[in-house]
Structures are given as structure tokens and as C-alpha cells.
Amino acid sequence: GTQTAGLGWGGWTNVADYDITSTNTYDGTSWTASPAAMGNARYQFSSAGTNTAALMAGGGRATPAATNIVDTEEFDGTSWASGGNLNTGTLTGAGGPQGSQTSAVIAGGNPPARSQTETYDGTSWTTSSATLIEAGSGQAASGTSSSPMLFAGNGPGGNPPYAVATCQEFDGSAWATSPSLGTVAAAAAGMGTPSEMVIAGGRNAAASPVSQTQTFTGVTATATASNITSS
């Protein structure tokens, strides 16, 4: 979505039932609870699209037993409906936010650290022969399946370091290395395009949360002194 037309859904809470199915919309000023509930509660899923044409795939479920999810759901601005299943259920797989309900990519994920790539055509997911150069999860992403897609940062697995500076670019057919981040990061938010990208927040190599932002110009990634602020 955008700063004036945002969408948030699902997640996890530490109270009874853990996984949630709620959907909320944002108008630039305030959040409003939507009557539209997801069909399958989950957290740390991959997503793409807009507030009136959103795509959600994979993720995890804490109850009744921890498990990775393969199903996809699509939102039309009013309600959620089922889409095609992933071939491999994955948690914290990265997906390009500029993707759509008819053209999306998911790569990586866990557990364990994965390198697979899947593409979506609006009906079904296809496992690509292209695999990440470095397996992992929680990459910040920008771009679409039909244009260069940049994955910045990485969580390489269950052992330290919990974040690295690796960047990888996808052209629709293969992954290639890209200039590394200025500072290691994983599970950060990605915004912009592969040639003008910003990542914010996430965690460092010790798995501690950070408030840094980094900008990428298509040549280098630079860590800035800016911190994330609440609004």
C-alpha cells in the first residue's frame, strides 16, 4: 500500500489463541478495523500488492501446533479468498512488495534456512530453477517478478550471526550478487525500487532490534544516522 492507503493483517499475539485473523486499513491518519477476516490465521507470511488487491502466502501457525503454511489468500478490498497453494510451506520468506496478485515472487524462508524461489501467476505457484545464492530468510525486498528484484540483508539460519549484509538481485531467471549493505540487517522493511531502495529497522547480528535506515542507489548501500520514529 501507500502512506495514505495502507493495509495490515494477521500476525501473532502472546495472549490466548496466539495467531490472529484480523485485517486493518490505514488512511494516512488512523487505523480502522475491517470486518474482513483471513481464512487462515498466520504470522510471518509473505505479501505483495495493494490495499484493494493484496496477496498473502505461506507463513506460520503457533497453535494448535507450530507449522509452516502452504496456502495463499487474496484480498479485494472487501474480503479474503483462497488462491493457489505454495509448493513448499515457508516462514519469513521474502516477497517483492511491488508484486501483484497475478505476478509475485517468494524466495528463501525457514526453518531450516532455504534457498528456493517460487513465482505466482494469479492461479498457481511454480518452483523456479533459480535459487538464492545464500540461503536464508527475512530479506528486505523491492521490485517485481517481471523486473529486477533486490533482496537486501539476510538471516542465514538458527545460529549466530543472525544477520548479514548480503544483497541478491533477481532478473526473473537467475539470482546474482549485488553490493552489500553498509550495516548487517535481517527482517528489515524494504521500500522503493531496486535502483533506489530504502530498508529500515530489523535486527543485527546479535538478533537485537535496530532503528537504523539504509539507502541503496543501485551502486552502493549506505547506512545512515537516521532513526525510525513513531507517528
Image (cartoon, grey):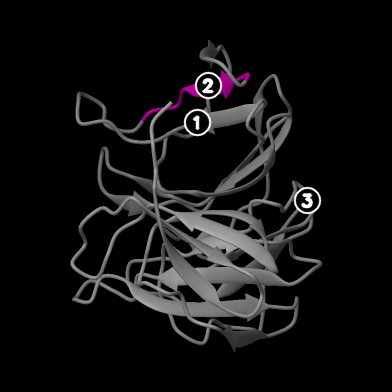
- The residue positioned 80% from the left and 51% from the top of the image is 102
Q: Which residue is tagged 1?
A: 9
Q: Which residue is tagged 2?
A: 24
Examine the rendering and report whether any part of residue 115 can be seen: no
Mark 3 or 2, nearer chain start = 2
Relative side of 219 to 227, left or right: right
Mark-to-mark CA distance, 3 and 2: 24 Å
Amino acid carrying mark 2 in the image: Asn
How many dots with numbers?
Answer: 3
Whether residue 174 appears in magenta in the rendering, the answer is: no
Examine the rendering and report whether any part of residue 147 can be seen: yes
| Contact (Cβ within 8 Å) of mark 1 with mark 2 | yes
| Residue lying at the far front of the rendered structure | 225
Nearest to viewer (mark 1 / mark 3): 1
Say what secondary structure mark 2 lies in: strand
Query: In the picture shown, does residue 5 fall above or below 63?
Result: above
Whether residue 26 appears in magenta in the rendering, the answer is: yes
- The residue positioned 81% from the left and 66% from the top of the image is 146
Q: Tell me which segment is drawn in magenta.
A: 20-27
Relative side of 87 to 159, left or right: right
Task: Name the image quarter holding residue 142.
Answer: bottom right
Mark-to-mark CA distance, 1 and 3: 20 Å
Closer to the camera, 188 or 93? 188
Q: Which residue is tagged 3?
A: 122
Mark 1 or 2, nearer chain start = 1
Q: Residue 11, percent across and down?
A: 39, 36
Closer to the camera, 223 or 103? 223
